[in-house]
Amino acid sequence: MIEQIKSLIEEKIQPEQIEVTGDGSHFQLSVVSDVFDGLRPVQRQQKIYAIIAELIANGSVHAISIKTYTLAEWKQASKFL
C-alpha cells in the first residue's frame, strides 16, 4: 500500500521528495512540492486527499497524517532536523 500511495502522488504532482510510512491502514505522508506554493495548509491537504480519495473510500486507507512543504519551506525546516 505504501508504494501505491507513493505512486499515485508522484504521478499527479511530481514531488521533489515524498516519504510514506505506516502499516495496515494507517499512514504518514511527508510531501515536498512547489505545487503547494501559495496554498493554505487545508488546501494542501485537500490536494493530497483528492489524489488518494479512492483508497480512503474503499477502506484501504483509514487514517492518514499529511505534512506538506514547498521546496523552500523544506530547505528551511531541514536546517532544524
Image: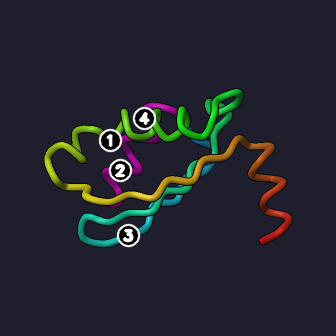
Q: What amino acid type is highlighted by mark number 4?
A: Glu
Assess whether mark 2 and mark 1 are in contact (beta carbons under 8 angstroms). yes
Give the vertical position of 27 relative to 41 (above or below). Answer: below
Q: How far apart are marks 4 and 3 (CA)?
A: 20 Å
Q: Label 2's element?
A: helix
Check residue 80 for magenta coloring: no
Q: How far apart are marks 1 and 2 (CA)?
A: 7 Å
Q: Distance between the residues labelled 3 and 2?
A: 11 Å
Q: Which residue is drawn at 54% across and 38% down?
A: 42
Q: What amino acid type is highlighted by mark number 1?
A: Ile
The residue where tag 1 is placed is 52
The residue where tag 4 is placed is 11
**Nearer to us: label 1 or label 2:** 1
Q: What amino acid type is highlighted by mark number 2?
A: Ile
Instruction: Say which mark, if any, is on residue 5.
Output: 2
Residue 26's image quarter? bottom left
- Residue 78 image point, x, y percent: 78, 62
The residue where tag 3 is placed is 22
Q: Which of marks 4 and 3 is nearer the N terminus?
A: 4
Q: Which of marks 1 and 2 is nearer the N terminus?
A: 2
